[in-house]
Image (cartoon, rainbow, N blue to C red):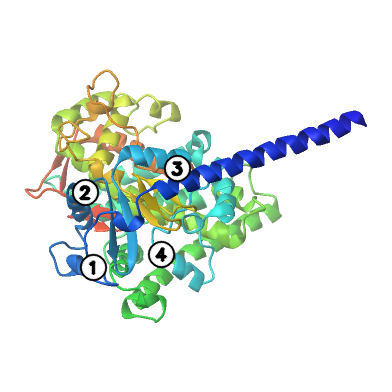
Amino acid sequence: MQIARLRTFSGKVETHQQNVLKTAHHETNVCQYEKGRPFDTIPGPKGVPVFGTLFQYTRGPYSIDTYPNALVDRYYRYGPIFKETIAAKTRVHIFDPEEIKKLYATEENPHIPPLLETVKMYRKYRDMSPGLGNVNGEEWYRLRSSVQKLMMQPVSTVKFLPMVNEVVADFIKRMYKIRASTGEINNFNFELSKFIYESSTYTCFEKRQQILDDEKGSHTDKLLACNRTMLELSTKLKFQLPFFKYISTPTWRKLVASEDFFYRFGLTLVDETVVKMNELAESGDLKNGQYEFLSYLLGRRELSYKDVSILTLSMFNDGLSTTSPSLVWQLYCISRHPEKQEKLYEEVKDLSGKSEPISAQTLTRLPYLKACVKEGFRLFPIAPDVTREPTKDTVISGYQIPKGTYLSLNNNLLLRLPEYFAEPNAYKPERWIRGDSTDSIHPYVVLPFGHGTRMCVGRRFAEQEIYVMLIKLLQHFKIEWNSCEEMGRKFRTLFTPSTEAKFKFIPRE
């Protein structure tokens, strides 16, 4: 009895001590916040009431396409922290990697605003699950923890490697088939998008869609066009006063039509696969390990069927918006630098026969390939920033930041600045190889998939597809850039290639 009382007393003391520490920590934070400079004193461009600087992007000197360039200009004018109001929404932009590091280090339960607010609105409008990127707090933790083992652990991701190998092999065969006598392939951006679509749906549904041979004007082309339209119109609405939230504007209706077309088809794929799984289970023909992706999600009690559907569809929807353009840029970088390409070819040429699959063990032994990919991500990041929404008042760079303020962590816009990289516009994979580089690179500058608990959940799937595709393309072809025009990027909330990919694929002996 005395021991029990002592334990109870000890527990009360411990709880009291924890409460004292929490109170002291809170009081310290409050004190620090009160010492910060007022939010209104954060520098930044002056706009007009409500509209802010909107007209600077719709009427000049900037444009929506080049919005990130404007942010870099403002960084040089106002410094590593500034605020800007566009169409009634104020954001604080942070360019200091040390401040970004501190913010990541102090995050306990990071909140992020939706990447595309229109997607969140649409899914609510159609009574869908919001998905991982549109929730925070306990709801986010419920979804994230349910897919963590399936999507974030290397041992789980490699289970789907045979599917990637199979689709890549078919893609290479198609390249030989459609390659012109000059070595060019028309509409190569479209061809790569079809690869991502085929690979992602094969992973999710374990059924080939057989769309690699589809041409322009096909159902597949319309589906891919809807994906582009969703990004384009969502970006357009970001640079308008938010009337679409209250009335059905023409732009909003076009966006809903594109979303409807895309999700109607995607949800049909989910439903048909689940019906097939149930039929096989009832007949006793469902094999162990079959339908790995969907079986795992359906087996999680905390996930509703709506959750499973959206998590699955996000696999290939997000891949079309991110992995596909990233592959275009990776190929662009190596095609413009033949000496780097040959060095990379020497690393990958003897990994396997041209027609043999790539193993998981092989992917762990490719330092130069991974350095090339990382350098490609440095020159062509997929997004200009990562966003955060503090859940409590905080101080950043000495300024008061009230909770709920939108923060843009603009580390991706530092990637071509001489303050952070020697020869910032040069393609130098060697800068990422220990012992070969003299560069001192801040660890919080190049984060292509984000950082911490809100890191991109599809990272390992994307990397796997990129590595296998690059290996096989290099084993089969020498790749040349066949245009006098340089490839840039356009802002569509994410980045997208500014021009069609003009490559020449010359078969290797």
Residue corresponding to mark 3: 163
Dot 2 lies on which element? Answer: helix
- Characterize the local packing of mark 3: few (<14), some (14-19) or many (20 or more) Cα atoms within 10 angstroms: many
Residue corresponding to mark 4: 117
Task: Find residue 28 and report its horizontal and vertical position in percent.
Answer: 51, 42
Q: In this rendering, which labeled residue sits more in front, label 1 or label 3?
A: 1
Q: Gap between marks 2 and 3, in whole Å?
A: 44 Å
Q: Residue at x 57, y 50 (%)?
A: 141
Is mark 2 in CB contact (under 8 Å) with mark 4?
no
Residue corresponding to mark 2: 75
Observer-nearest residue: 330 or 251?
Answer: 251
Residue corresponding to mark 1: 54
Q: In this rendering, which labeled residue sits more in front, label 2 or label 4?
A: 2
Dot 1 lies on which element? Answer: loop
Does 248 sit left or right of 41 as displayed? right
Residue 451 visible, this angle = no
Does 378 sit left or right of 138 as displayed? left
**Please, what is the three-letter code of the amino acid marked with disc 2?**
Tyr
Mark 2 and mark 3 lie on one chain; the one further toward the N terminus is: 2
Is mark 1 in CB contact (under 8 Å) with mark 3?
no
Residue 222 in the image: above or below residue 12: below
Q: Residue at x 26, y 67 (%)?
A: 52
Observer-nearest residue: 406 or 230?
Answer: 406
Residue 293, label in figure: none
Q: Gap between marks 4 and 1, in whole Å?
A: 18 Å
Mark 1 and mark 3 lie on one chain; the one further toward the N terminus is: 1
Q: In this rendering, which labeled residue sits more in front, label 4 or label 3?
A: 4
Q: Residue at x 45, y 42 (%)?
A: 163
Quadrant of the snapshot with the N terminus: top right
Residue 431 in the image: above or below residue 75: above
Mark 4 and mark 1 lie on one chain; the one further toward the N terminus is: 1
Does 120 sit left or right of 84 as displayed? right
